[in-house]
Image (spheres, rainbow, N blue to C red):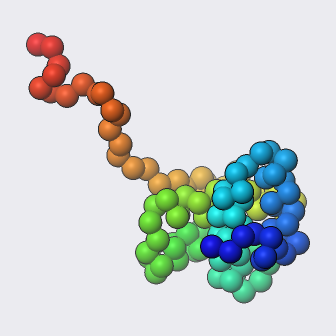
Amino acid sequence: MTPWQKRATGLTRRMAEDMQLRNFSPKTIDAYTYHVGRFAEFLGSSPEHATPEDVRSFQLHLINERKVGWSSFNQAVCGLRRARPAAGSSYRSEPQSRAVARTNRRMSGSVTRASAPR
């Protein structure tokens, strides 16, 4: 990915500055601004005027057409969440913006049937 400074538009610059104030990692800033840029390409316009339905169709596009992994999908969702406050509004009340991939993970040292007391 290209560092966000090389692809900074007004929205991504503001978004990156807000994340810097919150002490986000430079790699996180880069990943989130990358996905906001992909969203803008998908829309063909600025994400500032996107509707919740646009976000939903972009998420479906990522899963069904681009076949991205769940970690990339989560980065895109989180990046879009960060972009909305920079644009002056929020999708926080919209259920589709809360879509986060869930993976089944086992905790290390968890009790198994073989090791459980009887």
Picture quarter with the N terminus: bottom right
Q: Is residue 50 left or right of residue 70?
A: right
Q: Quadrant of residue 94?
A: bottom right
Does 86 sit above or below residue 114? Answer: below
Does 61 sit above or below residue 29? Answer: below
Q: Is residue 62 left or right of residue 46?
A: left
Picture quarter with the C terminus: top left
Does 83 sit above or below residue 42? Answer: above
Q: Is residue 14 left or right of residue 3?
A: right
Q: Position of residue 74 (x, y in %)?
A: 55, 58
Q: Position of residue 79 (x, y in %)?
A: 67, 61
Q: Quadrant of residue 44?
A: bottom right
Q: Is residue 88 left or right of residue 32?
A: right
- Residue under the point 52% across and 53% down: 100
Q: Position of residue 13 (x, y in %)?
A: 85, 66
Q: Position of residue 81 (x, y in %)?
A: 70, 57
- Residue under the point 77% across and 83% down: 45
- Residue under the point 76% across and 62% down: 83
Q: Quadrant of residue 90?
A: bottom right
